[in-house]
Amino acid sequence: MNIPFFKNKKSEEPSLYHDENIADHIAIVMDGNGRWAKKRGMPRIAGHKEGVSTVMNIVKAAVKYKVKVLTLYAFSTENWKRPKSEIDFILRLPKEFLHIYLPELIANNVRIDAIGDMENLPHHTIEAVQYAIDRTRDNDGLQLNFALNYGSRNEILNTMKEMVRDIHDGKLSLDEVDEQQFSRYLYTANLPDPDLLIRTGGEKRLSNFLLWQLAYTEFWFTDVLWPDFSEEEFLNALKEYQQRQRRYGGL
C-alpha cells in the first residue's frame, strides 16, 4: 500500500505522468531487504542480493522519466552495528553491482558518484566505486549517487568543524556564513536539494539521511519492500509528486 505524505485531498488518483514539474533530484531510502528475505525463510543477505537488481531497474526508470539526480542510501554510519557477516556482504555489493551493470550504466549515459565517509570503507568497496566514478566522469545524463558510510549528523558536524577551521585560518569570515555557504561544505555541495524522498518498507522516518538537504523536500512512503519496488511504484511516486504544490513557506 502506498502512503503519500501530506497528500492533497483534491488528487485522490494521480494524473498521467507528464514532462512538467518533474522531480529533478530524487533520494531513496531502500528499506526492507531483510524483511523481504525473512518472509521467504531466507537469510537477510538474500534480500540484499535481490535488492541489487531493483537498484538497476529503478536507475533505468529514472533515466526513462528524465530524472537528473538519483541518490540512494546504500550504507549508513549506523549500519556498522549490524552483524559483521551482513556488513561484509553489503559492502561487497557495490563491486558486484558495478561488475554486472557498469556497461549498461555507461550505455545509458549515467554518471556515478558517492557521498559519505569513504575513507573508512573496505579497500575493495572504495576501489570499485572509484573505478565507476572515473569511467563515467564524462557522462552527462542521470547522476547516480551512492550514499556509503553516510550519516547526516556526522556530515553536519564535519561541515561545522571545517568552517571553523577556515574562519580561524582567514579563508572564510563569520559574516560570510549563511545557508548557501554552509551547503557548499556538505557532501552534496554541487547538487540541488532533493525534490522528492522515497522510502520503501513501510517505515516513516529519515534515519539520519540528508537532514539539512531535505528541509523542503516532498516525502512519499510505501509499504512495498525494496526488492519488490517496481517501475510502476516508482512512477506512482513521480505522479504523486506532480500533484503537490510546493510553497516553501509562502502562499
Image (spheres, grey):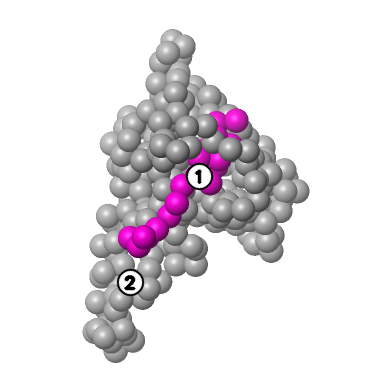
> How far from the left and from the top, in percent, is residue 8?
41, 40
Label 1 crowding class (10 Å Cα cut-off): few <14, some 14-19, many 20+? some
Residue identified by numbered label 2:
179
**Outermost top residue:** 41
Mark number, residue 115: none
**Outermost bottom residue:** 170
> How far from the left and from the top, in percent, is residue 78?
30, 42
> How far from the left and from the top, in percent, is residue 91?
46, 39
Q: Foreground residue, 79 or 196?
A: 196
**Most prominent secondary structure in the magenta stretch?**
helix
Residue identified by numbered label 1:
243
Q: Secondary structure at mark 2?
A: helix
The residue positioned 36% from the left and 44% from the top of the image is 76
> How far from the left and from the top, in percent, is residue 4?
41, 35
| Quarter of the figure with the C terminus | bottom left
Q: CA distance from mark 1 to mark 2?
A: 28 Å
**Residue 99 versus residue 144 in the image, above or below:** above
Earlier residue among tags 1 and 2:
2
Task: Give yes or no for residue 56 being in the magenta stretch.
Answer: no
Q: Is residue 157 left or right of residue 65?
A: left
**Residue 73 versus residue 200 in the image, above or below:** below
Q: Foreground residue, 218 or 91?
A: 218
The residue positioned 54% from the left and 51% from the top of the image is 23
User: Which picture quadrant has residue 197?
Assistant: top left
Q: Foreground residue, 132 or 73?
A: 73
Q: Secondary structure at mark 1?
A: helix
| Quarter of the figure with the N terminus | top left
Q: Foreground residue, 10 or 138?
A: 10
The residue positioned 62% from the left and 45% from the top of the image is 62
Label 2 crowding class (10 Å Cα cut-off): few <14, some 14-19, many 20+? few
- The segment highlighted magenta reads 232-251
